[in-house]
Image (cartoon, helix red, strand yellow):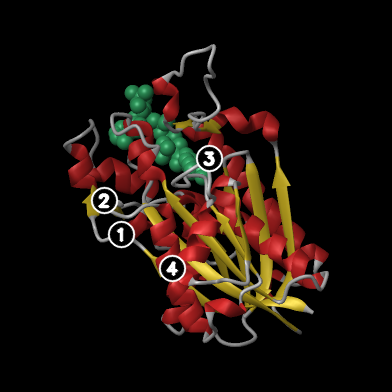
């Protein structure tokens, strides 16, 4: 038995923030943002938090899968911007959707979180522990963004994506995950860990910090590497892959990955222009769009791949 994706769903907030809007906040321009990143606009949560977005995406995924929330055995929510320290976001989703029979917890692996959640439920399913899972990637990075830092504030957006996974004969063929904690400081947000009752908190540490060029170099090396690894270990020819559903961090990173893999860019769908980098949510939002646009047929092979803070990275080869 393996885990098959039987339904997807996504949710993005209504509020659109364009590059022009940001140019009123920091010294930047639409031209700079578009040429360096491919981003035109992003969605920013005004009223809803991470768990509310995740719950909407989860409901849509359940509806798409045609199953009831009570059938879920496990809910994993990948997020690095939960609304609270506890209860965890997955438990809040459980309550919102009525998944009374599920165990629920969060996974923190930043932008690779959805791939980590997929690998984790896959292991549970293969071990025969659970049959039906809901995995969610949800982030509200606008809460962690320094809106006066032009180097980061133009990159991110808010949103959530979800997938229902069920034990079946075909589905996730293979997955790989990796981490490099030594390089963690190049992309960090250390708000909660700093300060205790003896040392005062430092509010300036509450925001995302990023060494953009280091992250760029890491991404264009690691993403092709882990994709090759997942294909080699599953003895799959790269030409069999219909789409590479990559973490949407930067148009140029997706382009560089396609080039390194010697694959045409039309096999690398992108929606970064509309949403920016929604962290753990980019891959499931994109997957949901492909699914709802009817671009995925039973038997299609897809590679899902993510990278991000930790540093972390992961890829999965999936038969639709
Ligand atoms: N608008 C205008 N200028 C900006 C700017 C903005 N929003 N942000 C930075 N700049 C300036 C810099 O200050 C710098 O100016 P200087 O030369 O006078 O010092 C110049 O633009 C070039 O900055 P640099 O950081 O070298 O640009 P870059 O080509 O590396 O592009 C990123 C910056 C962030 C777009 C790019 O490094 C990147 O995409 N990195 C990966 C980020 C990522 O994927 N993060 C998420 C991982 S999950």
**Is the distance from the Cβ of mark 2 to the nearest ligand 1 atom less than 8 Å?**
no
Q: Residues within 10 Å of mark 1 (few under 14, many from 20)?
A: many
Beta carbon at label 3 within 8 Å of ligand 1: yes
Of the image marks 4 and 1, the number of the one nearer the N terminus: 1
User: Does label 1 or label 3 sit earlier along the sequence?
Assistant: 1
Residue 266 percent location from the top left of the image: 48, 70
**Which is nearer the N-term, disc 4 or disc 3?**
4
Task: Give ligand 1's quarter of the image.
Answer: top left
Looking at the picture, tell me which residue is in the foreground, 265 or 241: 241
Local secondary structure at mark 2: loop
- Mark earlier in primary sequence (1, 2): 1
Vertically, is 255 above or below 266?
Answer: above
* Vertical arrangement, residue 83 with respect to residue 320, above or below: above
Q: Position of residue 15 (x, y in %)?
A: 23, 56
Task: Report how far apart the C-alphas of labels 2 and 4 lie in the structure.
Answer: 17 Å
**Residue on which the image places disc 3:** 216
- Give the total number of marks visible in the rendering: 4
- What is the crowding at mark 4: few (fewer than 14 residues within 10 Å), some, or many (at least 20)? many
* Residue placed under numbered mark 1 in the picture: 13
Sequence-wise, the earlier of marks 3 and 2 is 2
Assign a secondary structure to mark 4.
helix
């Amino acid at each position: 038995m393996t885990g098959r994706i039987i339904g997807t769903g996504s949710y993005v907030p209504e509020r659109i923030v364009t590059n022009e809007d940001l140019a009123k906040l920091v010294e930047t321009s639409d031209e700079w943002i578009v040429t360096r990143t491919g981003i035109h606009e992003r969605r920013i949560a005004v009223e809803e938090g991470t768990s509310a977005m995740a719950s909407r995406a989860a409901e849509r995924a359940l509806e798409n899968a045609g199953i009831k929330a009570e059938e879920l055995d496990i809910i994993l929510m990948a997020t690095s911007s939960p609304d609270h320290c506890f209860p965890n976001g997955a438990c809040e989703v459980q309550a919102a959707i009525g998944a009374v029979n599920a165990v629920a917890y969060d996974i923190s692996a930043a932008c690779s979180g959805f791939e980590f959640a997929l690998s984790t439920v896959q292991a549970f399913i293969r071990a025969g522990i659970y049959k039906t899972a809901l995995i969610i990637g949800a982030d509200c990075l606008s809460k962690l963004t320094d809106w006066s830092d032009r180097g980061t504030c133009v990159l991110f957006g808010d949103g959530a994506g979800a997938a229902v996974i069920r034990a079946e004969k075909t589905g996730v063929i293979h997955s790989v995950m990796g981490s490099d904690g030594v390089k963690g400081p190049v992309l960090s947000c250390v708000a909660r860990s700093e300060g205790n009752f003896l040392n005062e908190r430092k509010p300036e540490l509450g925001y995302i910090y990023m060494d953009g060029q280091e992250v760029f170099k890491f991404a264009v090396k690691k993403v092709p590497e882990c994709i090759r690894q997942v294909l080699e270990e599953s003895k799959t020819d790269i030409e069999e892959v219909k789409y590479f559903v990559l973490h949407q961090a930067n148009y140029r990173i997706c382009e560089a990955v396609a080039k390194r893999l010697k694959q045409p860019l039309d096999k690398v769908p992108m929606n970064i222009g509309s949403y920016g980098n929604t962290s753990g949510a980019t891959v499931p939002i994109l997957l949901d769009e492909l699914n709802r646009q009817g671009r995925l047929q039973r038997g299609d092979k897809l590679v899902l791949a993510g990278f991000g803070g930790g540093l972390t990275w992961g890829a999965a080869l999936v038969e639709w």
